[in-house]
Each structure stands twice: as structure tokens, then as C-alpha cells.
Amino acid sequence: MGQAIAFYGLSFFILFFAVLVVSTKDTVHSVLFLVLDFLFVAALYVLLGAQFLAAIQVLVYAGGIVVLYLFVVMLVNLKRPPEAYEDPHRRTNLGFALAASVLLEVGAIATYGYASPAPALARASEVFPVSGNTEEVGWLLYTSYLIPFEIASMLLLVAMIGAIVLAKREL
Amino acid sequence: MLLSAALFIIGVVGVMVRRNIIIIFMSIELILNAVNINLVAFSAQLQNAIGQVFAVFVIAVAAAEAAVGLGIILAFYRNKETVNIDEMNLMRW
């Protein structure tokens, strides 16, 4: 019961801050709401029993990515806010319509999923005899998912080099 | 599940409606977070840590995407002095 209350409270805050991120005029405020949103998502991960992922979320998202965003927002000091410029060809209603169609699709999937519940899947936890969340995730990362792990590290390296090249003033 | 879907849709609205490209990037981060919530929820439901492994990969890809995307924004801003996507028509023929 307490868990359900915590889940709904966290969900409410996550959605509330997500709406604020998208709707705020000031970009700096938007970034700060994004930090709060990520922290609440991390709390939700703890509630779902993924402590390692919660720590990663706080470190990488709230600590790393958001600081990157803040730096960029401060660097592109805007004298003329982008929303002030009105483009006659811009179709805002089309965006809302597209989002509504995605909402319909997801709703259809949800109702269909509730109508015909998936067959009970075999519990796979017996396969991995380790206990503890971080240990389990690390075990999987370094055994079954070693090659994707290495490819992800290569991707990060390439992205880092690419970002440095793009941000340099002259090549 | 429904929370994840709602967060995803807020992200989609953000991508479609806003004109500031930095806010569009933040909406993309929201979408990726929604996917992560879904993965972790199924991981908890099925008592299986593979979903969390995939969420770790999603976080890594999101970090790479943010770094490259913000680099592109900086390079573009240096040339054009704008972050309005409606004015980004360098590659229009």
C-alpha cells in the first residue's frame, strides 16, 4: 500500500516536472526542471529495485548531461528568444495532432494488452545465482552482454571525439 | 507502463511544438527516460536484470547523443547566431 502511494506520488512529480520542462519559456528554468525530473526518476528506480541504475541516473543524467545543457544554454546567450520569431509556415497544431495520434496508439496497445494478458514468463532469476542488484547487473554486463558493452564504449569514444571536433573554433 | 507512455507523449509534444532546439533536445532526453522507466519496470516485474542492462546501454547512448547534439548546436550558433529550428535551413536546396 505504501509502495503504491510512493509510486503514484513519484509519477505525479515526474509528469508535472516533464510538463514544466516542455512548457517553460525560460530555457535555464527548463534545464533545472529537467534535473528535478531526473532525480524523481532515480527515486522511482530505487522503488523498482534498481539501485545501481538509480545511482547511474543521478551521476550521468543529473550530474553530467544536465551540466552540459547548462553550459550550452549559458554559451548561446540569446538576445532574441526563438519563440518571439513567428514563422507563417509553422504548423503547431500538426504537432499536437501527431502527439494525439501517438497517444491513441499507445492507448490502443494498453487496452489490448490488458484485454489479453501475456502468458506467464518463466522466471529467469534462477539462472544467475548471484544476489544483490549491482552484482547481478555487473555479472550480466561482463558475461552475456560483453560485446554490446564494448561497442557502447566505442560509441562513447567516437561521440567524444566528434563533439570536440564540432565544438572547435577552427579545424 | 502508463507513466512511461505519458512521459513519452510529453516528450513528443515537446519535440513537435517548441522552436528552441535546446528544449527539443531535452524533450528527446525525456523520451529516452520514458523508455528506461519501461525497461526497469519490466525488469522488476519479471525478476530479471537484463532490462536494467539495456537501460544502462540506453543511458550511454543518450550521453553520446547529448554530447554530439550540443556540439552541433554550438557550431551552428557560432555561424548563425540562432537556436530557432525554423531558421535552420542550411541544407535546403
Image (cartoon, rainbow, N blue to C red):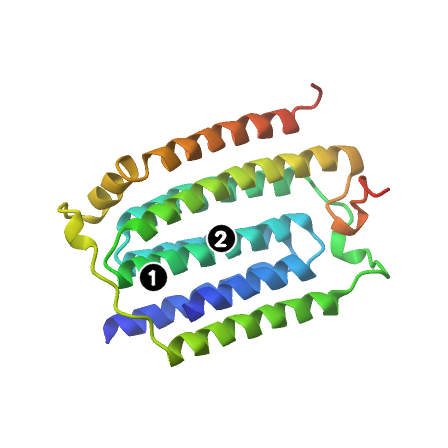
Residue at the image position 54 percent from the left and 31 percent from the top: A159
Crowd rating for badge 1 (residues with CA inside 10 Å; few <14, some 14–19, many 20+): many
Q: Tag 2's secondary structure? A: helix
Furthest-bottom residue in this view: A115
Distance of label 1 from label 2 (alpha carbons): 14 Å
Q: Is residue A129 above or below residue A114?
A: above
- The chain letter under disc 1 is B
Camera sees residue A118: yes
Q: In which quadrant is the N terminus of chain A drawn?
A: bottom left
Furthest-top residue in this view: A171
Q: Position of residue A138 (x, y in %)?
A: 25, 40
Residue under pointer 2? B32
Residue at the image position 40 percent from the left and 54 percent from the top: A39
Crowd rating for badge 2 (residues with CA inside 10 Å; few <14, some 14–19, many 20+): many
The quarter of the displayed image where residue A8 is located: bottom left
Q: In which quadrant is the C terminus of chain A drawn?
A: top right
